[in-house]
Image: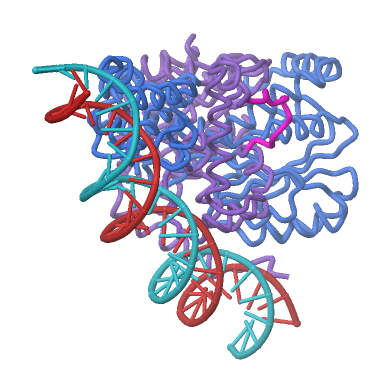
Chain colours: A purple, B blue, C cyan, D red
DNA sequence: CGCTTTTCGTAATCATCACTACAGGATTTT
DNA sequence: AAAATCCTGTAGTGATGATTACGAAAAGCG
């Protein structure tokens, strides 16, 4: 009659059980595990048939997973889930916090900040700018040059990586300024220079951007909330929030913009890029290097 | 498949339904109602037989109560209870709400997906793994090798970029497999190989990871929800959700993990890395290249 | 490239469940 | 106090659920 208050480490939480055994799970089991974890296990309270449909696996798979976790069968697992949820409902707040990291763990504070950054970045985002840039990047006649700073080099590279596959005429500007003069030769009218410059703005970048504009190129700038000096040269500017509880800035909001742009450009250039991609995959499939 | 988000006052809460009808309930029904209310309705998720036992009433009583509340039968009531509990369990984490969540604009749909990815990635994240890896990466005696695949190369580079500044002994493995044999020479005990491998898993990466383990290195893997074959070699695994409305996968959740790790490693290695950073900044300040 | 092993779903079987019909018993009404 | 009404549980039935056995397909291995 009396419910025993569980010591913190009493019954193993199914959540943790799932995470722990994750490695030994098969593909289908992992799919199921994902569905369970998604809704804080609530999905596991349905009948085995419904759960199977929801997870797109067969009912035996569910039973096998239950057994793997150490339960007798599905009903046994279901009881455990109910108990766990009941326990969590007792102290709604206290228990939830352990589950969803709300503590002082960095990952929590960090995510909160990132979430905030993304929201604010999107609030400030001008959809017209987004569309205009997407349009510009989709024009196969245009030549695209990507340039990043010390930290944002990776972002430029990431963008380059995708654009290069989707369309022709994409170039990654080398990071060492000594070769920039040559790169400038290619930037004339019909060229777009995509620059990344967040705080601890780099003079050299602005210099190059200015010269590119003089040469007739258009500049698209990704910067932070405060705005890099390159803004004056830029035809289009994206301002992203970058502050997080770290000594470093977060470029996640910038990456979000990049990924969204890639998706959009991909869509617009669908036909031609489809060919490029399949051609590329053929090439990759053909060359099986390092097959010792 | 997809749970529709209920408007705040959409479905009448069963709790309230019960209180409302309390007056018209019979003795046995009231006994049942009490049991239900006790455990925040969780008791109602058992089979009708068990619930009957728990409430010390008969099964027909349960059905009659369900009907009185306006439900078709017991399963119908049970579904409502599950939905209600699911709603209450919804992640307390800050929801990333776009300014225009309703628009079909890609950026909206994209952000929604990313937000979901991040939440689900964190749900699955094992904090112990995070801490263990942070600890490992903070050990200045360890040698760190970073390796990415076709797409994830940029992520590896981003991680490398930061780690390199924070601590000594960080290496980025070249992307061309032809030079991997040399790289392998450096990977012995005391080395950590950090691999990124998301779907369209690359055989070559697994090959290298396997050899690295044989040589005595430890492997840390960043992969997607399905799990790269490298998992078997890995001492620590991070699984991130990567699906977005795009032909491409999103590595944002992976980047979040990376940034959080950087923040943590930075903190742990605070003293020594502070020196490194200021030394680096001095160097950057001193060499004013490209100042035409 | 063929073999073995593992994984996964289909289909058949068995158990349990939700529900209905009915009747004993309590409560109320006249 | 007798009759009618309402409440409640027992028992039985159809339906759904959980489980097992088996075979196809995929993955791993030599």
Rendering quarter of residue B285: top right
Number of numbered tags placed on the structure image: 0
Q: Residue at x 55, y 41 (%)?
A: A79
Quarter of the picture holding the C terminus of chain B? top right
Q: B182 or A1: which is nearer to us?
A: A1
Which one is nearer the viewer's eye here, B178 or B18?
A: B18
Residue D27 quadrant: bottom right
Left or right? Give the position of A197 relative to A213.
Answer: right
Q: Position of residue B109 (x, y in %)?
A: 33, 33
User: Which portion, as a residue range, is magenta?
Assistant: A3-13
Query: Any magenta on residue A11?
Result: yes
Residue A61 among those drawn in magenta: no
Residue at the image point whose x is 63% and y is 50% from the top: A71
Please say if B241 is above or below A106: below
Locate residue A6 relative to residue A164 in the image: left or right: right
Task: Please provide percent x and percent y for residue B276.
Answer: 82, 20
Residue B166 is situated, as x and y percent measured from the top left of the image, at 77, 24
- Identify the residue at image location x=50%, y=13%: A228
Please, is residue A72 above or below residue A129 in the view? below
Percent coordinates x, y for residue B235 in the rendering: 77, 46
Where residue B29 sits, quadrant-wise, is top left
Q: Is residue A168 visible?
A: no
Q: Residue at x 66, y 60 (%)?
A: B204
Q: Nearer the viewer, residue A37 or B177?
A: A37
Figure quadrant of the N terminus of chain B = top left
Residue B111 in view of the camera:
yes
Residue A284 versus residue B84 in the image, above or below: below
> On the rendered structure, is A220 left or right of B264?
left
């Amino acid at each position: 009659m009396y419910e025993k208050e569980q010591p913190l480490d009493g019954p193993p939480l199914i959540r943790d059980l799932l995470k722990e055994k994750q490695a030994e799970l098969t593909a289908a089991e992992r799919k199921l595990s994902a569905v369970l974890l998604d809704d804080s296990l609530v999905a596991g309270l349905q009948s085995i048939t419904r759960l199977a449909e929801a997870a797109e696996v067969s009912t035996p798979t569910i039973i096998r997973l239950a057994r793997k976790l150490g339960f007798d069968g599905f009903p046994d697992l279901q009881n455990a889930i109910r108990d766990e949820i009941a326990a969590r409902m007792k102290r709604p707040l206290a228990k939830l916090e352990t589950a969803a990291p709300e503590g002082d763990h960095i990952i929590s504070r960090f995510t909160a900040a990132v979430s905030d950054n993304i929201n604010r970045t999107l609030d400030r985002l001008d959809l017209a700018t987004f569309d205009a840039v997407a349009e510009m990047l989709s024009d196969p006649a245009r030549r695209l040059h990507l340039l990043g700073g010390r930290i944002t080099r990776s972002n430029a590279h990431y963008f380059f990586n995708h654009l290069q596959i989707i369309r022709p005429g994409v170039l990654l500007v080398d990071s060492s300024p000594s070769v920039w003069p040559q790169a400038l030769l290619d930037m004339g009218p019909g060229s777009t220079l995509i620059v990344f410059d967040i705080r601890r703005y780099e003079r050299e970048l602005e210099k190059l951007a200015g010269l590119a504009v003089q040469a007739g190129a258009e500049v698209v700038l990704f910067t932070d909330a405060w705005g890099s000096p390159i803004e004056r040269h830029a035809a289009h500017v994206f301002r992203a929030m970058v502050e997080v509880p770290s000594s470093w800035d977060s470029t996640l909001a910038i990456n979000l913009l990049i990924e969204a742009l890639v998706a959009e450009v991909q869509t617009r250039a669908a036909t031609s890029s489809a060919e490029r991609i399949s051609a590329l995959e053929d090439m990759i499939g053909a060359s099986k290097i390092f097959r010792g």
